[in-house]
Amino acid sequence: MFTVAKKEIATYFKSPIAYILIGLFLLMISILFWTPFSAGSGDFMIVLENMGFFLIFLVPILTMRILAEDRKNGTEVLLLTSPTSLTKIVIGKFIAMYFVFLVITVISLIYPLIMVRFGGVFTVQLAGGYLGFLLLGASFVAVGVFASALTENQVISAIISFVALLVMWMAGAFSAEVGGFLGTLLSWISLLSRYDIFTRGILGLPEIIYFLSFTTLFIFLTIRVIERRRWIQG
Amino acid sequence: MKKESVFKKLLANRRLRYGSSAIVIMASVVVLFIVLNLIGGLVPFQWDLTPEGRYSIGEQTEEILEALDKDVTIYGLFDPTKVESSSEYIGLMDLLEKYDRYERVNVEYVDPSKNLGFISNLDPDQILNIGLKDFVVVSGNTKKVIKYYDMFVSMASEYSSFSSFDVGSKAEMAFTSAVFYATRDEVPKIYLTTGHGEYDFVDSGYITVGEVISVNGFDYEKIDLELQPSIPDDASIILIANPTSDFSEEEISLLSGFMEKGNSIMVALDSNDSPEEYKNLQGFLAGYNLEYGYDKIRETNDNYHISGNQYMIFPGLYTKTLLNNNIKDVFTKMLADNVRSVAVLRKTNSFLEINPLLITSESAVAESTASAGSNQIGAKFLGVAVEDLRFGSRIIALGTADFVQDQRLIYYKQYEESAIRFMLNSLKWLEGDTDDIFIETKDYFINLVDVTARQANTVSILVIYVMPGIILLAGLAVYLRRRNL
């Protein structure tokens, strides 16, 4: 599992895509960060909220090739017939993608540290917000990996995961419009609503369970999709 | 054994493993995911990480809710499924979840647009002014309405004259006091005298006091004794807040009659520069062995005054007269200014039980404000409580009124709690009660940085240009190197 992860991470950082993604993501955060900072605000929670939204664009590009490329290049067969179990392969690839996400997250800590340097406070609330960001990232990456397993075309994979993430994000925004049972349902499935709870300063066990089970569910679905394909192909 | 082999065989069946059963397995996992989260949603483990504890309830609220002996329903008049995730009402719903966990408290949300007539049923006479998005706390026939401005501290926006933003939450105070209010058997009423330049609960001086006593289960109203043939029967306490002119003999007569019915009076009088001697008021107080001094207290003991101003003093406190012991510690920093002494006269009135409330240090100077007076050095009482055992009536005379004056509370925010608690507990003692509610406003934590324009520009160059630039250049280097391989 970790061998697969290591190999994928090495591959990723040997291509310019990881650097371009990280660089652009940081540029967006920097622009968001600088406006309140220059006005004397040390509140990074607002930036963290927006960082969640930017992941909708970042993660599909990050994960689009992780399984689709194997399928397109024909190396998927080699993977499926290798002594390593399919579960370990998929989890290994998920870990690799999540590692890239972690690198971005760690680099983003530089902004609150700059605020602390100028008298701001790194609050427990912000730490909780970061925990939410990590859980959100795991869910997003799981969806991205799942989308990548559905097709051999990387662009289609990115579009699928982008649309899926956007729908799951926007569900929360529409829930208040719809109201009633459907509104509750939309709010329940909305990643935005769940993430908002963290950024509001609440650390809730239900939200932690939701994100972890959501991630597990999509990793499981990814395994099932590939396994089903293996069975269909014989 | 046979069973096991059949089971193994069944599992080994490729069709079962990868065929239609795959859908069943996937559906099962999805169901498991839903069930797990439904169960997880029932677990009320939540940690409030906000610095000000915005979504938490304090010990005082817990004690009140635990001690409830009547059922209380808190109605939120809106559809909770239509509240946007960014709305302040989401936080209120989180807070109310904590209330709902108590046996006697029930929180319900009713959308008045779908339940037509609900508001008119709650308030048939339309005297409560209930509106959409209000909360109504109901216990029996008692109802208390909580509006947005009761729950949040808002400030006008610098950028627009039409918008405001919230800087603090008073929600816990509002809900807890409303529950307390709604479950009380009787609501005591305080009448604040007018017509002598007194402070006012609505217009000037004692607006904060008015808000606090209101949420602590008191009703209040103004009364001009000059225009009243008698004091209303529903009056429990008369509050005389810093009059600048004396009361007439007729007014004093009304006050005396009021006391003979077993009621209570509080007089709070600052030291002021006016020549007013308050002869009639002093005569009334003399009946309780009390007399205001014509002086202004200056503290020379550094422990008893604020830094740099010997007239802004921290009086010593006798807490046992008024209060339960567990809150006496908060009284150690009650800030008072423009203070005059309250003397206890050496008369023998065995029916009077006299207890000091506030006292100066031994080295305080009572500077005379009377034309022929002289300064006196030594400890002076600044507040005294007297109980007339004949009628069961009570009176408190305070040599300060400004200690809870609105502007003082704003300027010296750090001493607000002590001052308000002293005032509240004095009123509670006058009413014959010792419980009080004071839950501080939860001021939202504002995380500020101290940065100059130059520093901000330097940081902008670093984070907007240098940092992403270095990473993008690294990407370019990797690309060029890979291209040449």
Image (cartoon, coloured by chain):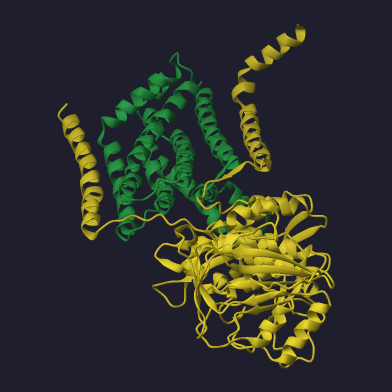
Image check: B141 left or right of A64?
Answer: right
Q: Return the residue nearer the eye: B317 or B189.
A: B317
As displayed, is residue A191 above or below residue A80?
below
Q: Residue at x 76, y 91 (%)?
A: B228
Q: Nearer the viewer, residue B415 or A42?
A: B415
Q: Nearer the viewer, residue B91 or B242?
A: B242
Q: What is the letter of the green chain? A: A
Q: Could you tell me residue A226's position as x and y percent?
A: 49, 28
- How many marks the image carries: the answer is 0
- Residue A21 in view of the camera: yes
Q: Is residue B255 above or below residue B323?
A: below
Say left or right for B224 vs B468: right
Q: Residue furthest left?
A: B484
Residue B78 visible in rendering: no
- Give the residue furthest to the top: B1
Residue A12 position within the rendered picture, expressed as x and y whole percent measured from the top left: 31, 31
A43 in relation to B390, above or below: above
Identity of the residue furthest to the bottom in this view:
B227
Tell me: residue B110, above or below residue B268. above
Q: Colour of chain B?
A: yellow
Relative horizontal placement of residue A171, taking residue A78 as reference (left or right) = right
Q: Residue at x 82, y 55 (%)?
A: B69
Q: Which picture quadrant has residue B128? A: bottom right
Residue B146 lies, in percent from the top left, at 67, 68
The quarter of the picture where the N terminus of chain A appears is top left
User: Along the horizontal axis of the image, is B485 left or right of B389?
Assistant: left
Residue B79 at x, y percent in the picture? 67, 62
